[in-house]
Amino acid sequence: MASFFIRTYGCQMNERDSEALACLLEARGHTPAASEETADILLFNTCSVRDQAERKVVGKVGLLKRLKQKRPDLVLGIIGCMAQNHGRALLDELPHVDLVVGTDCLPQIPDLVEECLNGTHGLVATDTSAELPVGLGGHRAGQRSAFVSVMRGCNQFCSYCIVPYTRGREKSRPVAEIVAEIERLAASGTREVCLLGQNITAYGIAETRREGTRDPEKSPFADLLRAVHDIPGLERIRFTSPHVKFMNDAFIEAITSLPKVCKSFHVPLQSGSDRILDMMRRGYTAAEYLDRIQRIRERLDDVAFSTDIIVGFPTETPEDFAATRDVMATVGYDMAYIFRYSVRTGTKAADTLADEVPEEVKMERNQLLLDDLDRRVAVANRRYVGRAVEVLVEGPSKRNAERWTGRSDTNKVVLFPPAPGLAPGDLVTVRIERTTSHSLFGEIVPS
Ligand code: SF4
C-alpha cells in the first residue's frame, strides 16, 4: 500500500473529482500523504481553461524531474483536463511522468497507479465515452458543505472555451442517483450542498432531446432542485454555473421560491457588449441577461449576484469594454472572477481570431473592473448593518482564532465571537455591526 497526494488546479468540478478519486484510492488501501514531498503517488489534477494554468503545471512537474531521479519508485501523474487536452504530448514534454489520464478515465486511475507501482511507466488513458464515468460518488467524511456533480461536459462551444473538448458532451446523472448521494451526505451531517455542472441549467436537456420529450417551457434542473429540496436534514442548496440561455420561467420560479436554495447566484456574463457576446457565441444579448437578473430581483427581497468576465477578447474596443462596465454597474455584483483573454488552441476563437488586444490593455481593463467592484461591494455590504442574518457556521477563523466564521445565505463571509457549544454545521443568527468589502462582522443573537 502507498501514500498519495493529489494537487488540484482549476474549478470546483476538479476539486470534486479529486475528492472522489481520493475515496477510490483509499478503498484500495492507499492512504493520504501529509505533503507532496512525502507521497509515494503524486497526482496533478489539472485545468486547461487558461494558458497560465497549464504553464504553471508544466513548470511545477518539470521541477520534479530531479525528485523522480532520486526516488524512481515515486509515481507521478498528470490527470484531468490538461491530460485530456494534450494526451501523449505531455509525456514527450515531461518524460519523467508515469501516467497521463483524461477526465472520463478517472475511475481507471487506481488500476493504472498500481501498474505504475509495479514498475510500468508512460501510461496514457484519454478515451472519452458517451456514458457517465461510474464510481465517482465518494465523499470525505464529516463535511458540513459538500460538492455534488450532477452532470459532466458542455454542448455550448463558446468560441473561447476549451471545456467541450476536455470534458466532452453533456451527460446528466439520473435524479434518483443524485438524491441518494445527497441523502447519504445529509444523514452523515452535511448541511449544505453545491450542485456542480459546467452548464448546470442544461441538466437533463440532452437526455430529454434524445427521448423526444424536450419541452423548452420546462426545466429538468428545476425538477432536480425540487427533489433535492425535499431531503430531510439538508438546509442549504447552492449550484454553479447557470447559463442565461436556459434560465426560463420554470427555472426562475424554482430558485426564487424554494427556501433552501441560497439567494446568491453566479451568472456568467463574460461581456456586456452584444458584438463581443455574439463573437463569443454566448447565445444572449446584454438586454436578455439583464432581463433574467431583473426577474430574479423582482421576486426576492435580498439577493446577491456574482459573475465571470473576460476582458481583452479579440477586437474588444474601448466602447465594448465600457458596455461591460455598464452592465456590471447595473447588476451591482457582489463578486466577480475577471480574466484576461487567453488563446486556447483548438477553440473557434483560436482558429479564427488574432489575440490582438495588447496585454497591458487587458491588464488595465482587468484592474478597472476590480476597482469598480471593490468600491461598489464596500458600499453595498453596508446594507447589512443592523440586520440579523442566518449563518452556516464553518469554524474558527484562520486569521483570528478569537473569531469564528461562516457564510450567509447570500454567500457573504460573516465573522463573530463564538458562543459556548457552537459547532461547525450549526445555523446561527448573527446581528451585523460593521462591514468591509470582504466580510461582515457581528454578534450571535441568542435563540
Ligand atoms: S457554457 Fe461556454 S464557457 Fe461555459 S463551459 Fe460551456 S462552452 Fe465553456
Image (tube, rainbow, N blue to C red):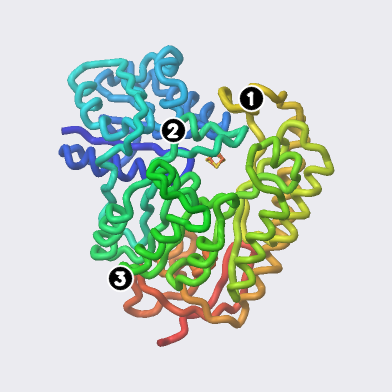
Residue tagged by mark 2? 168
Q: Which quadrant holds the C terminus?
A: bottom left
Residue tagged by mark 3? 233
Residue drawn at x 48%, y 34% as measured from the top left: 47
- Under mark 1, the amino acid is Ala
Relative image position of residue 406 (x, y in whole percent): 46, 67
Instruction: Give the mark nearer the N terminus: 1 vs 2.
Output: 2
Q: Residues within 10 Å of mark 1 (few under 14, many from 20)?
A: some
User: Please, is residue 388 above or below residue 6 in the view?
Assistant: below
SS label for mark 3: loop
Relative image position of residue 81 (x, y in whole percent): 44, 31
User: Please, is residue 84 above or below residue 423 in the view?
Assistant: above
The answer, for residue 402, to whether it is visible in the render is no
Q: CA distance from mark 2 to mark 3?
A: 34 Å
- Under mark 2, the amino acid is Gly
SS label for mark 1: helix
Disc 2 or disc 3, which is closer to the eye?
A: 2
Instruction: Give the mark nearer the N terminus: 3 vs 1.
Output: 3
- Under mark 3, the amino acid is Gly
Instruction: Give the mark nearer the N terminus: 2 vs 3.
Output: 2
Question: What numbered label is drawn on residue 221?
Answer: none
Residue drawn at x 66%, y 54% as measured from the top left: 289
Question: Does the numbered disc 2 mark a residue whose Cβ is under 8 Å from ligand 1?
Answer: no
- Furthest residue toward right: 319
Residue drawn at x 33%, y 25% as measured from the top left: 76
The answer, for residue 322, to whether it is visible in the render is yes
Front residue (pair 395, 130): 130
SS label for mark 2: loop
Question: What numbered label is drawn on residue 350?
Answer: 1
Relative image position of residue 299 (x, y in whole percent): 59, 73
Q: CA distance from mark 1 to mark 2?
A: 19 Å
